[in-house]
Amino acid sequence: MRAFVSVGLPSEVIGAMLSAQARMRLIGRRLPVRWSRPAAMHLTLRFLGDVPEDVTGPLGDAVRAACAPVAPFVLETATLGCFPSPESARVVWLGLGGETDGLERLARVIAAATAPFVTRQEDRVFVPHLTLGRIGEARRGDLELLAKGVASVVPERVVWRVGSARLMRSNLRAGGAEHVLLAECPLLGAKTDASDGRSESP
C-alpha cells in the first residue's frame, strides 16, 4: 500500500486554500494545473511510498510512540510559493508560519520512527507547506504570469493548533487519490477529533 504521515486540516484552513486556489485559477487560467481537491488536502509530514500491508499495525504503533512526547503547537497560513521556483513552477503551495519549529521536530521524529518500514529514504529538506496544485508543461509567458500572481495574492490568515498526526493510506483512483485514515496519533496531552483535524488539550 502507498502510505504517508500527515497533519489533518480544520475546515477553516481548507477554506483558505480553496480561496487561494480560486484567485490563482483566474491568474493562471491558461496553465495546465491539477488543483488539489478538498478531500485530499493535508499537510504531509512524511511520504512513505509503498509499504507491506501486514506492517500497518507496527507502523501505526511506531508513529503513535513518536508523536506521544511531542508537545502540540500552533501554525498559521502564510504566503504563497512555488517549487522549485515561480519561474519554473511545478507546484503551487500555501506556506506556513507560527511554531514551525514544533512542526519540524514532529517531522524529524516521524522520519526516524518510520525509517525501518520503508525501502527508499527521502533526502529532501522538509519545507512546511500545503499543496494547492501541480503544474504540467507550460509556456514561459504563462509561468511568468503565475509568478506575478504568487507574489500578489495574499491568502486568508488562519491560526490553528496541531494536536495529532495521521498515518494514511493512499488509494489511487481514476479521479484522483483517495486517502484513508489508518491511525490517529495524538501529541503530548492532546485529544483529537478525527473528523476535521481539530485538536484540544484536556
Image (cartoon, rainbow, N blue to C red):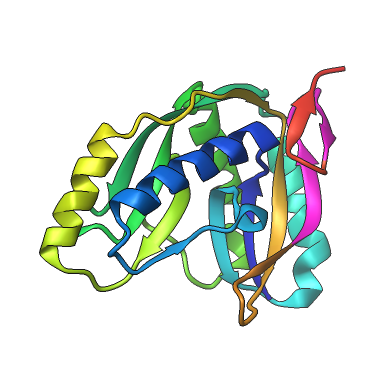
x 19%, y 57%: residue = 143
The answer to which quarter of the image holds residue 170 is bottom right
Q: Residue furthest left?
A: 141
Q: Is residue 54 left or right of residue 153?
A: right
x 68%, y 43%: residue = 8
Q: Which of 107/19 is in front?
A: 19
x 58%, y 58%: residue = 37
Q: Residue furthest top?
A: 202
Q: Position of residue 105 (x, y in %)?
A: 53, 33
Q: Is residue 150 visible?
A: yes
Q: Residue furthest bottom?
A: 174
Q: Position of residue 110 (x, y in %)?
A: 60, 46
x 36%, y 29%: residue = 154
Question: In the rendered image, which quarter contains the C terminus?
Answer: top right
The vertical placement of 13 against 75, above or below, is below
Question: In the rendered image, which quarter contains the N terminus?
Answer: bottom right
Q: Which of 198/122 is in front?
A: 198
Q: Which of 1/76 is in front?
A: 76
The vertical placement of 77 against 169, above or below, is above
Q: Position of residue 75 (x, y in %)?
A: 55, 25
Magenta-drawn stretch contains 185: yes
Q: Which of 81/199 is in front?
A: 81
Q: Position of residue 113 (x, y in %)?
A: 63, 50
What's the magenta region? 180-193
Magenta-drawn stretch contains 144: no
Q: Is residue 87 visible?
A: no
